[in-house]
Image (cartoon, rainbow, N blue to C red):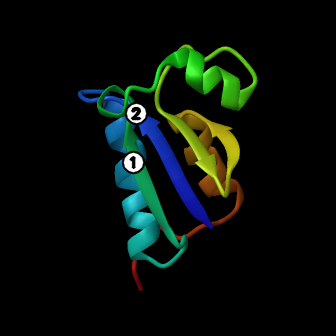
Amino acid sequence: MFVVIFGRPACPFCVRAKELASRLSDAGSIEGYRYIDIHEEGITKADMEKTIGKPVETVPQIFVDQTHIGGFTEFDQYVRDNALATEAS
């Protein structure tokens, strides 16, 4: 599975999401991840709302294999629910 994280600079939950995705990638639990800085890329909340199909109030917004998961809390729960390892063996 591949994770895409839409975030912004200085966002603590964006940092946590990147760290979790990095640990998952290092452990081989996911195929990789991409972090997209919405400010650098010129992506607005309205742009994300069109893709997600509902209002976007916060970042990060996280997708797993092109399926919208939610923010960091939902991503963390997804990892737990799917028993994805975050520690390299």
Please state which amino acid type lies under the numbered disc 2.
Gly
User: From mark 1 to mark 2, how far is it between C-alphas?
Assistant: 7 Å
Q: Position of residue 43 (x, y in %)?
A: 45, 26
Residue 71 position (above or below residue 24)? above
The label shown at residue 24 is: none
Q: Are marks 1 and 2 in contact (CB under 8 Å)?
A: yes
Q: Earlier in the sequence, mark 1 or mark 2?
A: 2
The label shown at residue 7 is: 2
Write the residue at 68% across / 41% down.
Answer: 68
Residue 27 appearing in the image: yes
The residue lying furthest to the bottom in this view is: 89
As rendered, which of 25 and 89 lies closer to the eye? Answer: 25
Write the residue at 60% across / 56% down.
Answer: 79
Say which quarter of the image contains residue 82.
Answer: bottom right
Say which quarter of the image contains residue 36.
Answer: top left
Left or right, 41 with respect to 46, comes to: left
* Number of marks in the rendered image: 2
Circle 1: element type = strand
The residue lying furthest to the front in this view is: 42
Write the residue at 67% across / 14% down.
Answer: 55
Write down the residue under mark 1. Answer: 35
Please state which amino acid type lies under the numbered disc 1.
Tyr
Write the residue at 63% across / 45% down.
Answer: 77
Q: Position of residue 80 (x, y in %)?
A: 63, 55
The residue lying furthest to the right in this view is: 53
Q: Position of residue 89 (x, y in %)?
A: 41, 86
Left or right, 81 with respect to 62, comes to: right
Residue 87 appearing in the image: no
